[in-house]
Image (cartoon, coloured by chain):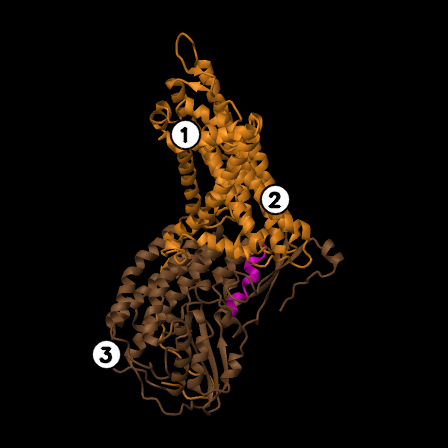
Chain colours: A orange, B brown
């Protein structure tokens, strides 16, 4: 089995003959990693479009792409070729340079985040920044800039409205997203994404169980952040034609498209990292690493990570093809009146929970904390208390949110609607009599 | 018609607190070539104006130069979603003028096929309305059922969309052999599918928040504007031509008329959904009671109605579609005028939209269920 990964060390030795050790470790290997991640993600993005089309097709009682290759498997490649050969159209009176560069900003912002995403242990992470979470939040908000620039420079009102919506939407949801993460960080005690995964691994628990509300808020805000249905207002095709990229065509349009899918991959990856234990899965470590198959361990871990992220991605597709679209003001309501208070309540409750666990800890009596080396290491009792706090928070949050919103229109929708009545009208006699001078017919 | 002022110079554009947004005629959700000029404050609609006529073909004028039988195919192109219903109003008007005695079998088959057409039209409305609000999947589900109806049409009339279904005095030919079996199969499967659509939409919070209280029009206002069809019944006005002035075989059918209460988009949605169920009920009764016999009346070689004015209307899927005909005793009508339900329903757009957001405009255009072929004629 080790032979499978033998070339890896062989290549390393080969490189060391030509370059210094520093160059190999800090320049060449990272380049290979970056190349791999970007290529694989680009492929993943291309095939995510294929998957989305197939999944939507199955939901809609049709087949989806079937013509190009077996089961239409080559469709993304055909699409890419088609888009590459299309005319690069720039509308008259558009702000040419901004129009030209906006798609690149979108793609770069989406792909650069992948630098810190821990796909697996060891060599499967490009770089482990100690403020990884902040990096992800900061860089992903640069993507908003691309949308605003694209909408503004197109010189089209639809694009402008789309850009306005997207800026408002992304700014509002970033707040809840950032706040939702804080709860998980209290348990992880680090901002490094690899560190967060490590904390979950060392304690053999996914933070989802400590932070169910945080996870829900994060996923919802993630969908909104990516402009996916049901929050796809910036590109609401029925209202704004195509929103911010109305005037884009060909490869430049597809860059936006790629950016959208790459951003989806990033958000699902971060959600997996923060809440679903990253690349950890029961038994994998014991069956591989413990027996000395290191590279196999890394490879399987990457697969586990991709599977978890893929499930979330499927959830995204599922929502898109099921739900209608929110209206702009309803979206803002949801962001500011539901998700933001929920995130704040979550922080308070989590903080109280952590304080209670620390307060209860007694080295001689009831032990709640095991260690503080990797995150907040809790004993079984501590874990139970944290889980009770997490799931109890569900009820508390539901109660407080209802209290905040009980007078709003959306909360009382079901009361506002009316049932229809069925009436049996009396039947008139057939009376199609001609008007005017003619004789009555029939 | 009221005109929306459009700021054109640089100065007026910068000074204007509002933005003018030109929606259509090439826009994905104006259901054809409708152009709506919106005056927006932020995203709130403060004024709007419909610009129609992009599909004008001068049908009423063309009709003045055609013989009575030759006009019928033009009627299929009015509301091309409901060609069968449109064809019926023309042939029935001519039949009434001529005093022809159409045999009951023809009346029954007409009832079945116009009701199937109503279901097909409502299904297309459901799909596109849901698509406008963002629920994409419903469209393809609705098309699946509509396809079954179109297959029946294709076997009966030889065409799917513009069927040219009827002839003056009856039908071009009798129902095909498996007609009853095909119709039965469709009406047996249909309620299950309809429940499926309602599961996805009726209780959906997003759907409710997009439709409840949006585009409200009171019954009195609806009558004042002249709304008809489901848009009128959504406001709680009990008016259905099938009941009030039964034509074809509706006098023999037993069905109920759904009425809304709020007059909002959600009520109109529920009314149309229930109408599909009632249509199915009518088809069921008609196919059970389908009499034997000829399908054609004895029609003179030359159709020359007596001099006079005639009006006949039927309950089309979109509303009351009527035909006003002036005959001068020759083979060609002196004047033909369509009472177009969509054209009249569209007039309520401004009243329904002002104060709502851009997103609601597409929802309201969808709920009015317009077809530009009939508006522009």
- Residue A152 locus on image (x, y percent): 65, 50
Q: From the image, state whether disc 3 or disc 2 is nearer to you.
A: 2
Residue labelled with disc 3: B292
* Magenta stretch in the rendered image: B343-357
Q: Nearer the viewer, residue A230 or A222?
A: A222
* Alpha carbon distance from label 3 to label 2: 72 Å
- Residue A60 locus on image (x, y percent): 38, 54
Q: Are marks 2 and 1 in contact (CB under 8 Å)?
A: no
Q: Are marks 3 and 1 in contact (CB under 8 Å)?
A: no
- Which label is found at residue B31? none
Near mark 2 (Cα within 10 A), the count class, few <14, some 14-19 or many ≥20, is many
Above or below A48: residue A281: above
- Residue B56 locus on image (x, y percent): 55, 75
Q: From the image, which quarter does the N terminus of chain B lie in?
A: bottom right
Q: Chain of mark 3?
A: B
Magenta region includes residue B350 = yes
Label 1 SS: helix
Near mark 3 (Cα within 10 A), the count class, few <14, some 14-19 or many ≥20, is few
Q: From the image, state whether disc 3 or disc 1 is nearer to you.
A: 1
- Which label is found at residue A295? 1
- Which residue lies at the image location 46% right of the left edge and 21% below the top edge? A353
Q: Is residue A369 left or right of residue A105?
A: left
Above or below B303: residue B149: above
Tags 3 and 2 on a common chain: no
Label 2 SS: helix
Q: Chain of mark 2?
A: A
Residue labelled with disc 2: A105
Q: From the image, state whether disc 2 or disc 1 is nearer to you.
A: 1
Q: Are marks 3 and 2 in contact (CB under 8 Å)?
A: no
* Alpha carbon distance from label 2 to label 1: 35 Å
Considering the whole magenta stretch, tell me its main secondary structure.
helix
Magenta region includes residue A372 = no
């Amino acid at each position: 089995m080790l032979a499978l990964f033998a070339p890896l060390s062989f290549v390393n030795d080969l490189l060391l003959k030509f370059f210094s050790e520093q160059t190999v470790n800090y320049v060449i290997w990272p380049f290979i990693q970056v190349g791999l991640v970007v290529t694989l993600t680009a492929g993943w993005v291309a095939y995510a479009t294929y998957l989305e089309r197939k999944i939507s097709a199955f939901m809609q009682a049709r087949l989806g792409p079937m013509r190009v290759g077996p089961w239409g498997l080559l469709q993304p490649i055909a699409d890419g070729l088609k888009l590459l050969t299309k005319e690069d159209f720039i509308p008259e009176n558009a702000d040419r340079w901004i129009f030209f560069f906006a798609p690149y900003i979108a793609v770069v912002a989406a792909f650069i985040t992948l630098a810190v995403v821990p796909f697996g242990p060891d060599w499967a992470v490009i770089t482990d920044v100690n403020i990884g979470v902040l990096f992800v939040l900061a860089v992903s908000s640069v993507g908003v800039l691309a949308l605003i620039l694209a909408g503004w420079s197109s010189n089209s009102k639809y694009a402008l409205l789309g850009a306005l919506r997207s800026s408002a939407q992304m700014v509002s949801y970033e707040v809840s997203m950032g706040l939702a993460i804080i709860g998980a960080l209290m348990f992880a005690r680090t901002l490094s994404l690899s560190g967060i995964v490590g904390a979950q691994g060392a304690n053999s628990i996914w933070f989802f169980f400590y932070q169910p509300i945080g996870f829900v808020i994060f996923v919802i805000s993630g969908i909104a952040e990516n402009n996916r249905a049901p929050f796809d207002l910036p590109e609401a095709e029925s209202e704004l034609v195509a929103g911010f990229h109305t005037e884009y065509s060909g490869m430049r349009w597809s860059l936006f498209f790629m950016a959208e899918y790459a951003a989806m991959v990033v958000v699902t990856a971060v959600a997996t990292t923060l809440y679903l234990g990253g690349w950890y899965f029961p038994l994998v470590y014991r069956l591989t690493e413990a027996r000395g198959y290191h590279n196999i361990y890394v490879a399987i871990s990457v697969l586990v990570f991709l599977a978890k992220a893929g499930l979330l991605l499927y959830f995204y597709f599922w929502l898109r093809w099921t739900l209608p679209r929110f209206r702009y003001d309803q979206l803002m309501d949801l962001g500011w009146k539901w998700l933001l208070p929920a995130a704040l309540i979550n922080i308070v409750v989590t903080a109280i929970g952590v304080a209670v666990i620390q307060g209860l800890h007694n080295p001689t009596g009831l032990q709640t904390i095991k260690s503080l080396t990797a995150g907040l290491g809790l004993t079984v009792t501590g874990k139970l208390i944290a889980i009770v706090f997490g799931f109890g928070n569900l009820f508390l949050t539901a109660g407080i949110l209802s209290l905040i919103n009980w007078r709003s229109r959306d909360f009382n929708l079901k009361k506002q609607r009316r049932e229809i009545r069925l009436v049996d009208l009396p039947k008139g006699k057939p009376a199609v009599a001609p008007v005017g001078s003619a004789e009555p017919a029939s | 018609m009221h005109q929306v002022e459009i700021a054109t110079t640089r100065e007026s554009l910068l000074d204007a607190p509002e933005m003018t947004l030109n929606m259509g005629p090439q826009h994905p959700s104006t259901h054809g070539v409708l152009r709506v000029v919106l005056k927006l404050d932020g995203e709130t609609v403060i004024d709007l104006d419909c610009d129609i006529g992009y599909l004008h073909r001068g049908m009423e004028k063309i009709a003045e130069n055609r013989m009575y039988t030759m006009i019928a195919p033009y009627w299929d192109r009015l509301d091309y979603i409901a060609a069968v219903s449109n064809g019926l109003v023309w042939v029935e008007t001519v039949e009434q003028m001529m005093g022809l005695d159409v045999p009951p079998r023809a009346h029954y088959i007409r009832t079945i096929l116009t009701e199937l057409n109503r279901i097909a039209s409502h299904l297309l409305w459901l799909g596109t309305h849901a698509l406008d609000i963002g629920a994409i999947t419903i469209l393809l589900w609705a098309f699946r059922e509509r396809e079954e109806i179109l297959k029946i049409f294709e076997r009966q009339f030889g065409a799917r969309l513009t069927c040219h279904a009827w002839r003056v005095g009856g039908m071009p030919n009798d129902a095909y052999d498996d007609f009853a079996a095909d119709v039965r199969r469709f009406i047996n499967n249909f309620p299950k599918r309809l429940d499926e659509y309602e599961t996805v939409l009726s209780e959906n919070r997003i759907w409710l928040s997009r439709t409840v209280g949006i585009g409200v029009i009171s019954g009195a206002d609806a009558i004042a504007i002249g709304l008809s069809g489901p848009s009128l019944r959504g406001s709680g006005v009990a008016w259905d031509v099938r009941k009030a002035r039964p034509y074809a075989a509706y006098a023999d059918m037993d069905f109920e008329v759904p009425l809304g209460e709020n007059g909002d988009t959600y009520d109109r949605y529920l009314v149309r959904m229930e109408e599909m169920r009632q249509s199915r009920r009518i088809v069921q009764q008609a196919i059970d009671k389908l009499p034997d016999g000829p399908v054609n009346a004895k029609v003179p070689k030359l159709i020359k109605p007596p001099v006079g004015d005639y009006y006949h209307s039927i309950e089309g899927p979109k509303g009351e579609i009527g035909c006003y005909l002036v005959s001068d005793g020759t083979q060609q009508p002196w004047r033909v005028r369509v009472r177009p339900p969509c054209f009249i329903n569209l007039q309520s757009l401004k009243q329904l939209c002002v104060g709502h957001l851009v997103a609601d405009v597409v929802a309201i255009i969808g709920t009015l269920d317009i077809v530009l072929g009939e508006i522009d004629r």
